[in-house]
Image: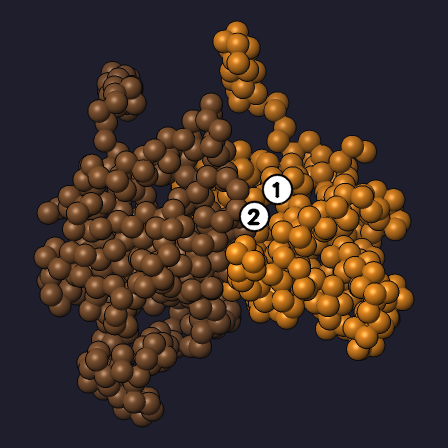
Chain colours: A brown, B orange
């Protein structure tokens, strides 16, 4: 790089750093949530503050589905699994051994959800086994990039929330380490988390399946064998945090009661902490749902969250923009 | 910090960086292993080299017992478990339900090992359950700091290998991320890994037990419930790496056939990689063992490792020093 250009970069950086006008969260309206997030970050990063937290303890954990990207009409991983299942069933119809799998092979999302979350897990399980982790991730990324959402017609990878991308960047700029802690599959999320969120694979915690190490024709490989070994949801989220991170976060964000335990854990005990729930109130720009349904149900969080000091983000009111590029 | 002091620091840093005499591995003799480690690190960090590896891919994984610290006469975690078991059995002798547990309560290590590795796991399991992760780690750290090794009489935390401490620091200075990938318990290792090795909890992969999230009297806590959910040994090591890191290492170090699969995985495929096995040849300064016994058995590694391009470190010949401060 030419020294004169470098000097220019440094000058811009100084200006940005020195200006009180620089807005780290431009896609957030200037309402309560934005103000309290910035106040929290400024207090824990100010060495003269009583609330100061050293960098190695600035751990922030984010749910994925419904918190960082859309989860309607059903988790995108479920939609991907459905497409894979339909292709597999064409070759071998004998794999359709349950009602959920039969519904899945017809593309009948309602029929799967009628069998409960276990049905969805079955579809995912059958779809996501019998291939290496690398093969699975390449296929998933291809699908996420080239297939489009049924209502918005955007590629799935573009259905991330712009305000949350800004929040992730802001926290990292302020010395936080940002993790995903999701009920979704760890291998699936890692297929796109680095590109989409700037979050590398080792900062993704998720539901885990049987993975086997084998040497095939002299070539070592990791194969997805089917079967779930760990469910990173509800009370599993603090357990996933304990296993993968080993330190309590000081910031946690979610959108459903599957995140309640994670926020409860994060905001417990002495020391500063911040709990955030995204409330889907925006039928016009995204989806509106909370207390009912199979996906992203939010009851306890709405009832108890405010009393626990958590911030409820009203998507319609608090976000100036939902998706990037709008 | 006073500016003049800062300038002094910068000058020293410049001198060290610019000097070909700076030795990153002073406790290694100038034999093959040291030379090949430095040659490898220099090649993967040189942007003009064909072997150049960007920082985010410079992942190094280290076994713990017998690779970073001593594992004789038995894994230190086993010795700790024995002490805890003896205390527990005084209060409640009914917990001694198996031959291994009865041998353990008498402090009979040979009797436990005679029942195989399962017996040792039983002792560890009974000892390490019924308390929170925090309580367990505080107790383990206290034991490691205040109890001494039966033959060397050093505190256990001081039985780390000085040459390996230097190797960890050297790799980190060169942009590597250093992980522990151990058959030992993840919570046990995290109790001391940051202080002893500079490795934070989120870079420790190990054997995992049942952990439950509960809210007791309004206080959220993580409790160790007994029972093993994942064994991070042998073929489990690449699986543990896949779960926790999600990217193939380019450097792996171990000392037993429990590390074979990890080195095989690391050194497979295209691209530069380095596999290292510590061979315990030094009865005078540490212990001498390899092909026989219950702990750290090394057969395949000695037979096949050299043919796979792995470096075998002869502790007696290649290390100028074993423990810190000698």
Q: Residue at x 40, y 59 (%)?
A: A260
- Vertically, is A138 above or below A83? above
- Vertically, is B30 above or below A9? below
- Vertically, is B76 above or below A211? above
Q: CA distance from mark 2 to mark 1?
A: 7 Å
Camera-side residue: A165 or A80? A165
Q: Which residue is mark 1?
A: B194
| Residue A139 placement (x, y as % from top left) | 28, 66
Q: Residue at x 21, y 80 (%)?
A: A110
Camera-side residue: A261 or A55? A261
CB atoms at circles 2 and 1 under 8 Å apart? Answer: yes
Q: Residues within 10 Å of mark 1 (few under 14, many from 20)?
A: some
Q: Residue at x 18, y 61 (%)?
A: A288
State the count of labels: 2
Mark 2 chain: B
Image quadrant holding the N terminus of chain A, namely: top left
- Vertically, is A68 above or below B92? above
| Residue A223 placement (x, y as % from top left) | 44, 71
**Can the viewer see residue B321?**
yes
Q: Which mark is residue B302?
A: none
Mark 1 chain: B
Q: Which residue is mark 2?
A: B201
């Amino acid at each position: 790089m030419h020294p004169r250009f470098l000097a220019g970069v440094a000058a811009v950086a100084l200006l940005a750093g020195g200006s009180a006008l620089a807005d780290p969260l431009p896609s957030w309206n200037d309402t309560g949530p934005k103000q309290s997030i910035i106040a929290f970050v400024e207090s824990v990063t100010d060495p003269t503050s009583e609330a100061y937290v050293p960098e190695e303890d600035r751990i922030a954990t984010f749910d994925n589905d419904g918190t960082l990207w859309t989860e309607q009409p059903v988790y995108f991983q479920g939609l991907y699994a459905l497409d894979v299942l339909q292709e597999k069933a064409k070759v071998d119809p004998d794999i359709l051994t349950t009602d959920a799998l039969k519904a899945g092979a017809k593309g009948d999302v309602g029929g799967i959800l009628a069998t409960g979350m276990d049905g969805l897990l079955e579809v995912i399980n059958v779809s996501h086994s019998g291939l290496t982790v690398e093969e699975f991730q390449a296929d998933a990324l291809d699908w996420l990039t080239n297939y489009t959402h049924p209502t918005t017609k955007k590629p799935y990878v573009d259905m991330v929330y712009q305000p949350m991308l800004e929040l992730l960047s802001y926290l990292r700029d302020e010395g936080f380490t940002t993790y995903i802690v999701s009920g979704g599959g760890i291998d699936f999320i890692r297929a796109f988390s680095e590109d989409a969120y700037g979050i590398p694979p080792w900062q993704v915690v998720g539901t885990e399946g049987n993975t086997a190490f084998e040497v095939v024709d002299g070539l070592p490989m990791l194969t997805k064998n089917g079967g779930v070994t760990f469910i990173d949801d509800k009370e599993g989220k603090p357990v996933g945090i304990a296993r993968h991170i080993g330190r309590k976060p000081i910031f946690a964000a979610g959108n459903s009661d599957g995140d309640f335990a994670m926020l409860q854990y994060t905001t417990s005990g002495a020391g500063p902490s911040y709990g955030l729930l995204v409330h889907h109130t925006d039928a016009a720009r995204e989806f509106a749902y909370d207390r009912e349904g199979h996906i992203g149900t939010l009851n306890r969080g709405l009832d108890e969250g405010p009393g626990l000091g958590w911030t409820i983000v009203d998507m319609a009111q608090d976000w100036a923009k939902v998706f990037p590029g709008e």
